[in-house]
Image: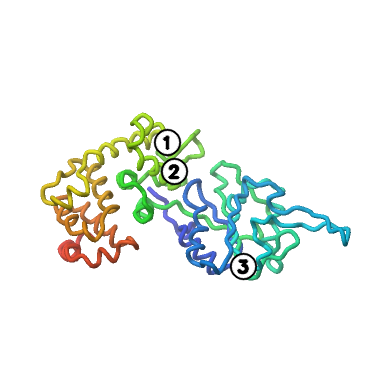
Amino acid sequence: MTTVNFGNTVTLKQAAQLISAVPDNIFLLEGEPGIGKSSLMGVFEQEYGDAYNYVYFDCANKDLGDVTMPMPNRDTRETEYYPNAVFKMRSGKPMVIMLDEYTKAPQPVQNMLHPLFEVRNPRLGDMPLPKGSIVFLTGNLSGDGVGDNIKGHSLGRITRVRVAKPTAEEWLMWAAENGIDPVMMAWVSQYPHCMESYTSTGQDTNPYIYHPKRMQKSYFSPRSAERGSNIIKVRHMFNSDALICALAGTIGESAARDIQAFIEYQDQLPSKADIVNNPTTARLPTTSGAAAVMTYTMITLVDKDSINPFMDYLERLAPEWQATFCISIAKDTKKQGLAFKCQKLSNWVARNEDLL
């Protein structure tokens, strides 16, 4: 059972809203590995467009010379700190700077970046930060056991916010809009505890997730699920042994072995063409797992030419899968228009309000 929040955590979307609403604060977004913290830069690029320069800085893999470097001024016979070109300081344009994995950076790198946290005169080396710039940090939870540390004088200048791991339902909505393979989506819908946090009650025996008390070479997370999806999409290019080996090295062996059955389901189900041409006679899935794969495949493939026959086919599935399909495409920002224009879907909603 998941622990009740009571305001202890925020979603990634809420974290982005906080940073945008309070740009003068330096937010440190903390969360367990693989939950999507590093993807936030894309959110700001989409929101602000050309109004900012965008700087992604992977602190854990940097050295001092990657931040600033002392250079001699021959006229004054003094040295000045020159910032690395990656920070685009000389453009004068306000920036969104993401200091990713700041809490894993070597201490000298943390020290060199620290002046960016100053309220009155944020700077990098000897150069002031352009006015209107935004700086935020990411890191893992101290309990994750992956080497995160930050000094007290830095803590006093930042706002720490814990980012929650997305639930299976939240992740599925994201997955539907971002090209995740239907097999991966179907498996997550049937095994929602794969998105549980190790900090929640009763997760010590969860075989899928990251847990600092276990030795793990790979585990299931939103990040590894996306990479696992990439493997599943091209499974026709290699045999089943190679497929399971690659999945095990990406999402963990327990998840890989379980997903193998869902892959077999998809390979046995009717194609899009079969459903479009024969919606009332096309083969039906015979198990819950196969029905999940079929439903999420349809969610992925639906378009203006297939939505009506898809709705006819859906009427032959269990009500829960009909509801999953209709709710998912109605919430999908890329397919909402398609859903709202479909009379058969509107009729279904009118008949099945109790399922929504």
Percent across and percent down for residue 10 are 47, 59
The residue to which callout 3 is attached is 94
Sequence-first disc among 3 and 1: 3
Q: Are marks 1 and 2 in contact (CB under 8 Å)?
A: yes
Residue situated in front as seen by the camera: 315 or 270: 270
Does residue 245 lie above or below 100 as drawn? above
- What residue is at 37 percent from the left and 34 percent from the top? 243
* Residue neighbourhood size for the residue with mark 2, other residues' Cα within 10 Å, grouped as few (<14), some (14–19), many (≥20): some
Q: Are marks 3 and 2 in contact (CB under 8 Å)?
A: no
The residue to which callout 1 is attached is 252
Q: Do the residues labelled 3 and 1 touch (CB within 8 Å)?
A: no
The residue to which callout 2 is attached is 224
Sequence-first disc among 3 and 2: 3
Which secondary structure, mark 2?
helix
Residue situated in front as seen by the camera: 350 or 38: 38
Which secondary structure, mark 1?
loop
Quadrant hosting residue 249 = top left
Q: What residue type is labelled 3?
A: Pro
